[in-house]
């Protein structure tokens, strides 16, 4: 039976260290500020945004929410971002995705000042990650790296297989594993002999978006299995990994919920703190 990786515990540790630093900043008159924009009424996005605001309060950040109607125009949304880009009390700007179909997600992300792009989604920040010279790391992949580090799981020289090639998780995840000298393979819907590839993995990251897609026959005995999935099955939250059978074979495994999910928010807090320090010329 695998060791179950406790994302809530590690996220609490990350938030505690952010909160400690915020206390020091506040003595200098600096309070990190995060603006969260949500367009429309997607219920999952609403839960994520509420959790992000709650975490801001926990670590001592100032936060603002912009809840815009589903029929908001591109111009209206960009005007909100424009004001936030210019405000000195706002260090981080986050626009919750997905946006309603009529809005151009890429253009919206690009419009956020890259120095306030605490999601690290903008082309500038993605490029910086590629060359290993970054201020912000994308929250979910960075959260996975934090979990591996907390549990002393070495990446160097390991066969790392990422299933999924999204811009938010799969692609940046592969880059962060590569930075730690893993041997990285990225699989996707067109990958041939998927099971053969995933069975080689010492570290397997599932970011497919399909409930219980990864089964025990796809996993090597003793592998570390990281489940980034957030799916609903029969009304219940479940990941991309068939937990009951895969946990019998893995050495470490993340549960859903309580694994990677809480880490995403912890890393968002870390990025916002970093933004506040950069904007105030505080260098670690
Ligand atoms: N939608 C799903 N995950 C994320 C995330 O990490 N950031 C934003 N902005 N939207 C998301």
Image (spheres, rainbow, N blue to C red):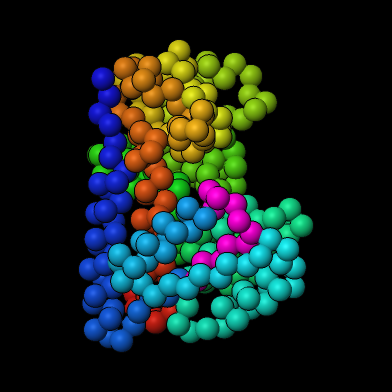
Residue 81 rendering spot, x and y as whole percentages: 62, 74
Residue 127 among magenta residues: no
- Asked which quadrant contains residue 52, the reply is bottom left
Q: Quadrant of the N terminus?
A: top left
Residue 41 among magenta residues: yes
Left or right: residue 124 versus residue 104 is: left
Residue 152 rendering spot, x and y as whole percentages: 25, 39
In the image, residue 45 above or below residue 117? above
Question: Is 98 in front, or is 160?
Answer: 98
Left or right: residue 183 versus residue 81 is: left
In the image, residue 9 above or below residue 252? below
Q: How many discs mark residues in the rendered view?
A: 0
Left or right: residue 107 versus residue 96 is: right
Residue 21 rendering spot, x and y as whole percentages: 26, 70
Q: Quadrant of the C terminus?
A: bottom left
> Which residue is outermost to the bottom?
29
Residue at the spot 29% in from the left edge and 46% down from the top edge: 8
What range of the chain is rendered magenta? 35-45
Question: Is 214 in front, or is 173?
Answer: 214
In the image, residue 230 above or below residue 224? below
Residue at the spot 30% in from the left edge and 29% down from the top edge: 252
> Which residue is outermost to the top?
217
Residue at the spot 56% in from the left edge and 30% down from the top edge: 210
Residue 75 rendering spot, x and y as whole percentages: 74, 73
Residue at the spot 39% in from the left edge and 42% down from the top edge: 260
- Asked which quadrant contains residue 123, the reply is bottom right
Visible residue check, residue 269: no
Visible residue check, residue 283: yes
């Amino acid at each position: 039976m695998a060791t179950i990786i406790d994302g809530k515990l590690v996220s609490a540790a990350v938030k505690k260290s952010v909160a400690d630093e915020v206390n020091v900043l506040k003595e200098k008159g600096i309070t990190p500020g995060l603006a969260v924009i949500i367009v429309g009424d997607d219920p999952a996005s609403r839960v994520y945004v509420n959790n992000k605001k709650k975490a801001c309060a926990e670590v001592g950040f100032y936060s603002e929410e912009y809840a815009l109607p589903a029929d908001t125009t591109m111009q209206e949304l960009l005007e909100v971002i424009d004001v936030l880009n210019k405000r000195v009390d706002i260090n981080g700007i986050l626009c919750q995705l997905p946006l309603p179909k009529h809005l151009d997600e890429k253009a919206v992300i690009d419009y956020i000042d890259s120095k306030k792009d605490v999601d690290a989604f903008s082309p500038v920040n993605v490029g910086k990650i590629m060359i290993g010279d970054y201020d912000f790391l994308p929250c979910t992949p960075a959260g996975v790296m934090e979990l591996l580090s907390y549990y002393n799981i070495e990446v160097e020289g390991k066969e790392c297989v990422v299933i999924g090639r999204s811009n938010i998780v799969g692609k940046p995840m592969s880059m962060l594993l590569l930075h730690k000298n893993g041997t990285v393979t990225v699989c996707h819907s067109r990958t041939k002999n998927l099971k053969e590839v995933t069975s080689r993995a010492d570290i397997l990251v599932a970011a497919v978006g399909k409930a219980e897609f990864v089964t025990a026959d796809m996993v090597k005995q003793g592998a570390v299995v990281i489940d980034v999935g957030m799916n609903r099955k029969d009304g219940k939250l479940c990941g991309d990994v068939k937990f009951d059978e895969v946990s019998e074979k893995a050495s470490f495994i993340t549960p859903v919920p309580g694994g990677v999910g809480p880490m995403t928010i912890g890393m968002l807090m870390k990025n916002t703190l970093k933004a506040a320090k950069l904007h105030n010329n505080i260098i670690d």
